[in-house]
Image (cartoon, rainbow, N blue to C red):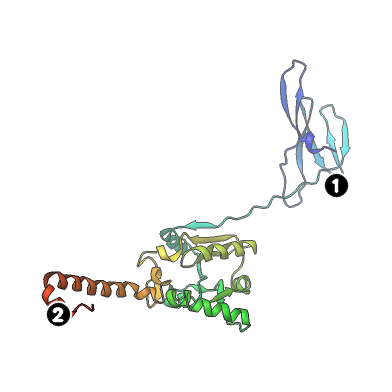
Amino acid sequence: MFSNDERFRLTKSASNDWSTDWVHARQVAAEGAGDMGWNGGLGCATQTFRTSPLEFKCLTHRGETASGKPIRRRGLAIRAEVNYVSAEEAKQLIAEGYTVIDVRDKSQFDRAHIKSCYHVPLFIENKDNDIGTIVKRTMHNNFSGLFFGLPYTKPNPEFVQSVKSQFSPESKLLLVCQEGLRSTAAASKLEGAGFQNLACIVSGLQTVKAGTFDSVGTTELQDAGKAGLITIQGKISAVLGTVLVCAYLFITFFPEQAEKLFPPTS
């Protein structure tokens, strides 16, 4: 029986030159057809044939026969990597047969989404009514919900199962979200579940130029994440800025009229 240390070893010849012995090279590894390899010994190579699962015989260069037990080999598993692409590359993947899965929450999905995509949210709205959830939801709605229009959510426990019920592990899937974080997390979950052909758009749909994809909704894909007071902040700032500039110009060029309209309070 050959040990792991004997597989590759250096043997010193009579002339003191070092040479590498190739102990074993697997040449047949499929359909149980048997293994064939080469065993080295002091500068010479011998051919081996496996005769049963428990033993093998080795025919040496001298015509002698040696027997032993085969070495159990470990199989190699190749793990697929998630492919991170730009919007233009994502468009090409769709043309090549990739299916789009939108993992955003329902509110963002309803504002705008890629036509003919599947919606499987990674997070769903948290409607639990325990005391802790009610307090957190109220705080969230009065800040993030009010200013950014973000719903109070929780992880979707059925996410992986929902995808597996609709697609096989060999399916080509392009995962999209608004900023790229949720799609990355979703890809990690699906990769762990055995899916092999996964892709994500770097930085999400917010980087997509108008017209890149055929979309459905009331706004552009890159703007689907904007909601709440932040969407009208620019308009409010513009109106307020205009009023202040006009007031400044009025006071500067018409000081007497301004003094009559705005008399000092002292």
Find residue 124 and report its image quarter: bottom right
Q: Residues within 10 Å of mark 2 (few under 14, many from 20)?
A: few
**Given this view, does label 1 or label 2 mark the residue nearer the observer?**
2
Seen in the picture, residue 80 relative to 256 is either above or below; the reply is above
For the point 76% across and 25% down, the residue is: 11
Q: CA distance from mark 1 to mark 2?
A: 111 Å
Q: Is residue 18 left or right of residue 111?
A: right
Circle 1 residue? 52
Residue 256 position, x and y percent, is 11, 75
Image quarter (top left, top right, bottom left or bottom right) of the C terminus: bottom left
Residue 103 position, x and y percent, is 52, 70
Residue 94 position, x and y percent, is 46, 64
Find residue 95 and report its image quarter: bottom left
- Spot the residue most to the front: 266
Residue 260, label in figure? 2
What amino acid type should be assigned to the residue bearing mark 1?
Answer: Ser
Find residue 245 and report its image quarter: bottom left
Residue 92, label in figure? none
Q: Is residue 241 left or right of residue 256?
A: right
Q: Which residue occupies the foreground of this view, 262 or 83?
A: 262
